Amino acid sequence: MPARTGAQFLDRLARTRTQVEIQGETLTGGLAEHPAFRNVVRSYAELFDMQHDPVYREVLTYLSPATGQPVATSFLIPRTQPDLELRRRAFKLWADRSLGMLGRTGDYLNSALMALASAADWFGQADPAFAANIVSYYEKVREEDLLCTHTLIPPQANRAVAGSQQGGGALMAHVVREDDNGITVRGARMLATIGPFADELLVFPSTVLRGTPEDKPYSFAFAVPSDAPGLRYLAREPLDYGRSHFDHPLGSRFDESDAVVIFDDVHVPYERCFTLGDPELCNGFYTATSAIEHMTHQVVARTTAKTEYILGVTSLLVEAIGIGQFQHVQADLAEIIATLEMLRAFGRAAEADAAVNAYGVLTPAWAPLNAARNLYPRLYQRFPEILRKLGASGLMATPTEADVTGPAAHDIGTYLQAATLTGAERVRLFRLVWDTCISAFAGRQALYEYYFFGDPVRMAGAYVASYDSSPYTARVRDFLNRP
């Protein structure tokens, strides 16, 4: 099957029997029509349809080396600078469609699988079968255009101890037995965004493993269908409240469900295992394969699109209520502009300084990408704050679509008009601002960006530890020692 259409994505979802627990209800199918998922899955369907739109398909697809049919550009193994640029343009097109609000579009993990499969020899260190497995799985996802999610971290029962010690070792997903055909996994993992409606679940290594015998049952990487027997998702409360796009312009379109994944003796065939019982390989899973660079390349494209949206909506707000002449407002806009240009510069530097890795893949430079992923979680927190400050009390009493078209229409036209907008137009804009900076959806976005790559404090520690500052300290010492 070549790159899927939206209808094909929805048809497969309709035939899938994924078990989802949500708000006291157990679902075993029918997710495409369930109120918690029906709008966001249609937003995902639109992305698949873009692959067939004549305006976008030359960027969003390329010809499969196996079949000659169009497949998603996010699977393309970059060998040249134009390849890297094409991948980034494809990432950006999808991100623009959702204003950067969809954080788990397929191109993110497609990029990981591309890098992992290219580094098949690294997996083969433990067993040649693992090398064959990762290549075969990458080709399967590419040719069937499957939507993947992943799960990484253990349940947070007691943060004072390692994941392998949570609940005496029983809480975190672990291998309980092996047989001639595969492994059986029991326990739980967090946090599978889009898990309930993804085609496949990638269970990848999470925290650093110590390499002790006790860590062996927690050392694995594998993939299973989302409706595998014994697998279930415990989803959070939906933030799409079934309201109109006017009232909840973002939440009614882009609420990606987040879920705890529970493995109730899930059997995983060996051919779907990529590493097993080897903590050292798990610890190098992302860095030794260049997967982290290619995943972050996609993230920087998405956060660039998101920051462009923030600049656009903030500028419209400023213009609408006539506050653009104030210097503190200009300072806030300058902060957003600087963040945007910084992200663009990081992305461009990563591509300009790209180098071929040990497996022949042209890989974006890590230094600028690493800087971006350490800065953006904090920088994004300023955007809702700026919007709240500029919108001020105007965000507190914003009517709904029913008011705009109902008996209050005349009052809204008279008393809620703005410097450049009618009352109805102002309400529509302020509903969007509200859904960006105040609503439950907005709160989830801020939390999501803050922890996207993990705890920012721990990330900062790792960043400092990995950065070679010795040339700069040597320069200062030389200066101090000048006669």
Image (spheres, rainbow, N blue to C red):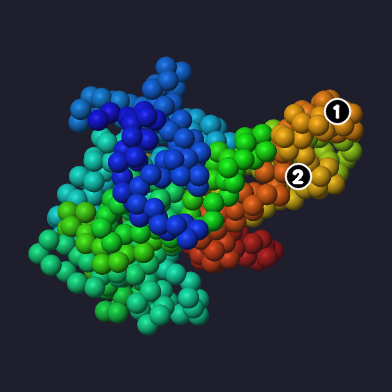
The residue wearing badge 2 is: 387
Number of the label disc, if any, that sits on residue 91:
none
Q: Nearer the viewer, residue 354 or 127?
A: 127
Quarter residue 162 falls in: bottom left
How many marks the image carries: the answer is 2
Q: Nearer the viewer, residue 65 or 16?
A: 16
Count residues near mark 1 (Cα–Cα under 10 Å), then give few for <14, some for 14-19, many for 20+: some
Is residue 346 visible to us here?
no
Quarter residue 260 falls in: bottom left
Is residue 168 visible to us here?
yes
Residue found at x 82% / y 38%: 330
Q: Where in the figure is residue 99, as x and y percent of width and height? A: 58, 36
Residue found at x 83% / y 42%: 394
Q: Is residue 78 left or right of residue 45?
A: left
Q: Amino acid at mark 1?
A: His
Q: Is residue 421 left or right of residue 338?
A: right
Which residue of the protein is positioned furthest toward the front in this rendering?
407
**Gap in angstroms between the C-alphas marked 1 and 2:** 27 Å
Which residue of the protein is positioned furthest toward the top in this rendering?
54
Q: Secondary structure at mark 1?
A: helix
Residue found at x 78% / y 28%: 424
Q: Where in the figure is residue 444, as x and y percent of width and height? A: 60, 53
Which residue of the protein is positioned furthest toward the bottom in this rendering?
168
Number of the label disc, if any, that sits on residue 410:
1
